[in-house]
Image: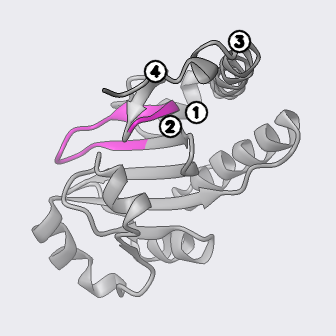
Amino acid sequence: MEKINIELLENKSLQTQIHQLKEQFIGLFASMANQIPDAALTALHPAHKGKKISKGNELQHCPYQVLDIVRDFDKKNGFNIRFLNWWGHGLYIIIYHGAAHTPCADEYHNYLSKGFALSLTGSPWDYKGMIIHKMYSTDIPFEQIPTHIDKLKHLQFIKRINYNIGVKDLEKSLMEEWRTIKKFKGFE
């Protein structure tokens, strides 16, 4: 018979620290969302559905916090920018493009030059594949994007962001990523 890990279960200090860290990321994402006006989203993607913060405890047995910006997951014309903080795995930006909403060559090359990689997973939600199994590439030429989309039915970029020690420094870094993505798309 398995024993209950009572030491972990009764470690109130650890549980409090975990709760505080979760709330720190929710606060960080809320602050970011509040800095992005809906008018900027409309200019970027007229069919946007705003911003949303999500959280959970069971993404491959680990907690996560998410900030979605744009929130249009339409398989054909959708677009989304996702900031994913996945405990034990890291902080990522994941950019989703529906099959008919693909970037032009310059935008594609801008993503790659700024540290993004092209996801090779068949599902835009396959974080285990993208992150744990590293199913992404920076070696796919733009000319092969139509073949990639025919096969996977979407286009998605992923970039890992290093944690900074300070919350404000991390927020500044993530907001700079947001501004860079807007520039890729011809805004700002």
The residue identified by callout 3 is: 12
Tell me the residue at 46%/22% (across/down).
54
What residue is disc 4 on?
4
Q: Is mark 3 in CB contact (under 8 Å) with mark 4? A: no
The kind of secondary structure the magenta stretch mainly shows is strand
**Above-or-below relation of 157 to 146:** above
Classify 10 Å Cα crowding around label 3: few (below 14), some (14-19), many (20 and above).
Answer: few
Mark 1 vs mark 2, CA separation in Å: 5 Å
Q: CA distance from mark 3 to mark 2?
A: 47 Å
The three-letter code of the residue at mark 4 reads: Ile
Q: Which residue is at 32% across, 60% downward?
A: 129
Q: Residues within 10 Å of mark 1 (few under 14, many from 20)?
A: some
Instruction: Measure the alpha-carbon separation of dots 3 and 1.
Output: 43 Å
Residue 187, placed above or below residue 121: above
Element at badge 1?
helix
Is residue 75 visible from the viewing direction of this image? Answer: yes
Q: Quadrant of residue 7?
A: top right
Neighbour tally class for label 2: few under 14, some 14-19, many 20 plus, Cα within 10 Å: few
* Tag 1 residue: 40
Q: Which region is colored magenta?
A: 61-80
**Residue 120 placement, left or right of 95:** left
